[in-house]
Amino acid sequence: MTDATTVPDVGPGVPTVPDVGPGVPTVPDVGPGVPTVTHWGSYLVRAEHGRVVALDPHPGDPDPSPIGGNVASALTSPARLTRPLVRGGWLEHGPGPAGVDGRPRRGDDRYVPVDWDTAASLVAGEIRRVRERHGNRAVFGGSYGWGSAGRFHHPQSQIHRFLNLAGGYTRSVDTYSSAAVTVLLRRVAGGWQTAMDSTPIFDEIAEHGSLVVAVGGMALRNSQVNDGGLGIHSSPGAQRRLRAAGVDVVSVSPLRTDAADFLDATWLPARPGTDVAVLLGLSHTIVEAGLHDRDFLERCCVGADRFLAYLRGETDGVVRSAEWAAGISGLDAGVLRSLAHRIATERTVISASLSVQRADHGEQAPWAALALAAVSGSMGRPGGGFGCGLGALHRNGMRLSRVPVAALPQGVDPVSDFIPVARIADLLLRPGAEFDYDGGRYTYPDIRLVYWVGGNPFHHHQDLNRLADAWQRPDTVVVHEHVANALARHADIVLPAAAFTERTDFAAGREDPYLSVMTAAAPPPGDARTDYDILAAIAGPLGIRDRFTEGRSADEWVQELYRRTVDRAGRLGVTLPDWPELVRRGGVPLPDLDRPEPPYAALRRDPEAHPIATPSGRLELFSETIDGMGYDDCPGHPTWLEPAEWLGGALAHRFPLALVSGQPERRLHSQFDNGAHSRAGKVAGREPVTVHPVDAAARGIADGDVVRLWNARGECLAGAVVSADIRPGVVRLSTGAWYDPVRPGGLDVHGNPNVLTRDHGTSRLAQGPSAHTCLVELERWDGPLPPVTAFDGMPLVEPRAGDAAPHGAGD
Ligand SMILES: Nc1nc2c(c(=O)[nH]1)N[C@H]1C(S)=C(S)[C@@H](COP(=O)(O)OP(=O)(O)OC[C@H]3O[C@@H](n4cnc5c(=O)[nH]c(N)nc54)[C@H](O)[C@@H]3O)O[C@H]1N2
Ligand SMILES: Nc1nc2c(c(=O)[nH]1)N[C@H]1C(S)=C(S)[C@@H](COP(=O)(O)OP(=O)(O)OC[C@H]3O[C@@H](n4cnc5c(=O)[nH]c(N)nc54)[C@H](O)[C@@H]3O)O[C@H]1N2
Ligand SMILES: [Mo]
């Protein structure tokens, strides 16, 4: 049964040729298809016999992402969810903690198909039971994750709107991407947006700049991706222009491939986790030579005196010199000294990627980078200054559209409880315990119901074995998913969600400003429905259907949100076509509107007239506010604090390799890992792990071998790629391989790095995730090879001969 509102009505007149404006081919040399937008680019979707068969790149995209090659194969694979499922143990025993009192564990159980009426009334009944017995704060609807592009079908907006109407929920704040730097910048630099608005774009750097120091690199593979949608991939071209203009790039990173080949970057492979020392050493060298920007430090910053005293060792006798930094980072002191001289004498961007703050004391690296930029003389000048995650996503370094695009209103959450996003396992394991966050002290509520739509904690969270234990605690876990991934396999009620190729919507690629329609290309398979239709069905028995839908079908909502977008754009003097015309054209470019002066440039020009949103109105190199919180893991100025695990620490004797687990080249996070393009990158069917030849030889490992990585938290298999493009002593295993343990808590046979990473907040300030602080050991795996079962689909309860169908089953 397919719900009527999700049957695509692409209608006559839907163009297969998007109008992308002058300068690009108007006739695609690909087969017919309907336009869509993903987080990794725009495509034309081709379908045959009601099934998506291919995503062809947007004809105007000069550097299309091959990630689109995952979609068709993944959505038609055996892992695709096509009917509602309920976990056997939950059906048999009812709601309650799993893995105790003879109840099977979540993640180690089988599933029973049910019909939609049964599924919807089970979910509605649980929401009612939990809120009546325990209050709405016992519902966790954090639901962190990327979901898919689309202004209306955005899964987070859908679930948050629904749960707010259902009385509220405990939510999560900040992101896995940037928690530490976001909370820090709010306190010391006027906030994330202010820093982003002050980060020069590549073309300005090409025009005015001469040096980019990219701490954590700016991997081209990461600029394939943009949150919310992407028009065409214009970042690679902009990075090429930067190089052609003669700008030099220095990449401080354990991986050579963290800067594009064509940038010809100088590679400084520091030990992971030592960036703060490197940045302090550079600042000290500049100050010692008297080359620091006294004027900017005095007029536009507060606390420079405290920071400089720390650099000089006036408080503790430790001089943060280039030699000191070299001893910690493994870089050469002479190289650091000459780099410092260039930074102080040339127009420079000091960029901190997001990876360096996804680490123990992750607040310190971006703060030290900001301080170096303030010292350097380039802050607030064209083509220079602080680079907030330059190149980490497609938009970072590109000009963003300022045309406002409407979103689905989420309403207001009547519940005040929240967690910092990466404290999910603590929340479930320690109800009633207190936690610190950004100067406040809060309590974890007792969660009974977890409801997840459009994110994958069994991908994104650290220490998955700990999460899997924590996940047994609630009474009920409800999940909407496309596919039988580890999240679905750890849920009680699994509701099959339509994918973006199966629903109509619109989205805007904000970086190469382009607003596009997303036309449904195929109906959802089997009983799959849009998240909206699923939630509307559950809203019925809860008595909130009318308020949830406001009487609109999905397609009516899409057109309403587009109408609001047209209105908002009109108020800025921008005329957008009406919906039928947008559909006819496929998409429209958005014009570039006037921009205010970058906030740090305005600050430099006149700090009295243009203060930033800090207590002092200035950049804070010493923050009285943070200092006043009294956190020993986040002092009042940028400080080198030894990470809990690093190559210079005691644990390195037992686990001598640093693990970096950054973003995967062949997919977005865990999405479509079962797709063709992602699978083509596996080695012996496992996620590839990059190992330096010296480390491989010492362990008898050859390219292509299956290896085992382990530490005290967990173990996994992976496929060795032996390469000199990595610093010796470091291994790299990207995120996103679907978690596939042989038994609960046991060996993950597929290569998910999060069985190894640590689940600790960056500090009490931001409580961000600290995945990059991780030591491991490695060996060749000579044992029998356990098969990868991650892509096989949901384990179903086999109906025994003579059994009646389970209650409500049948399609
Ligand atoms: N070790 C380590 N871990 C990390 C990181 C790291 O660097 N190292 N990086 C972190 C970062 S930066 C991030 S942002 C997170 C990402 O973590 P997530 O955003 O949670 O990862 P995704 O795999 O994108 O999860 C999205 C899920 O939503 C599902 N989905 C997509 N569209 C829809 C939809 O329309 N409806 C429904 N119901 N479901 C949908 C997909 O199938 C997928 O399972 O990971 C974090 N984890
Ligand atoms: N293809 C693809 N692109 C993506 C994504 C994806 O899933 N796939 N995800 C997107 C998302 S959600 C985000 S938030 C951004 C993330 O953007 P980033 O956080 O910048 O990206 P990462 O890949 O996590 O890390 C970049 C590099 O940092 C290096 N690194 C790790 N630890 C250290 C360290 O201690 N010091 C230094 N100097 N370097 C270190 C690693 O070599 C790694 O390759 O990427 C986005 N881009
Ligand atoms: Mo992210």
Image: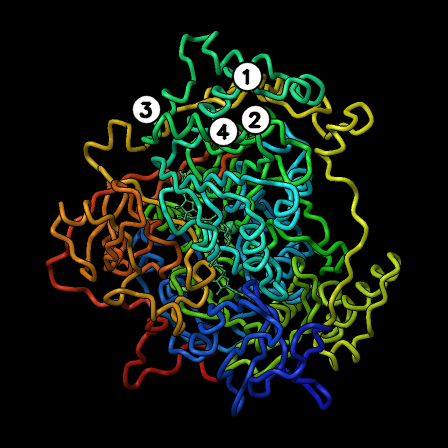
Q: Residues within 10 Å of mark 4 (few under 14, many from 20)?
A: many
Q: Quadrant of residue 750?
A: bottom left
- C-alpha gap between disc 2 and disc 1: 9 Å
Say which residue appears at 61% left-offset and 47% top-offset. 206
- C-alpha gap between disc 4 and disc 2: 10 Å
**Disc 4, SS:** helix
Three-letter amino acid code of the residue under disc 4: Gln
Pointer 2 residue? 371
Pointer 1 residue? 307
Ligand 2 has an atom within 8 Å of the beta carbon of the residue at disc 1 = no
- C-alpha gap between disc 1 and disc 3: 21 Å
* Nearer to the camera, 457 or 592: 592
Disc 2 + disc 1, Cβ < 8 Å: yes
Say which residue appears at 59% left-offset and 22% top-offset. 621
* Nearer to the camera, 172 or 385: 385
Three-letter amino acid code of the residue under disc 1: Phe
Q: Return the x and y of residue 440 as percentages of the image width and height.
A: 59, 27
Q: Which mark is residue 364?
A: 4
Nearer the N terminus, badge 1 or badge 4? 1
Q: Return the x and y of residue 707 as percentages of the image width and height.
A: 19, 55
Disc 2 + disc 3, Cβ < 8 Å: no
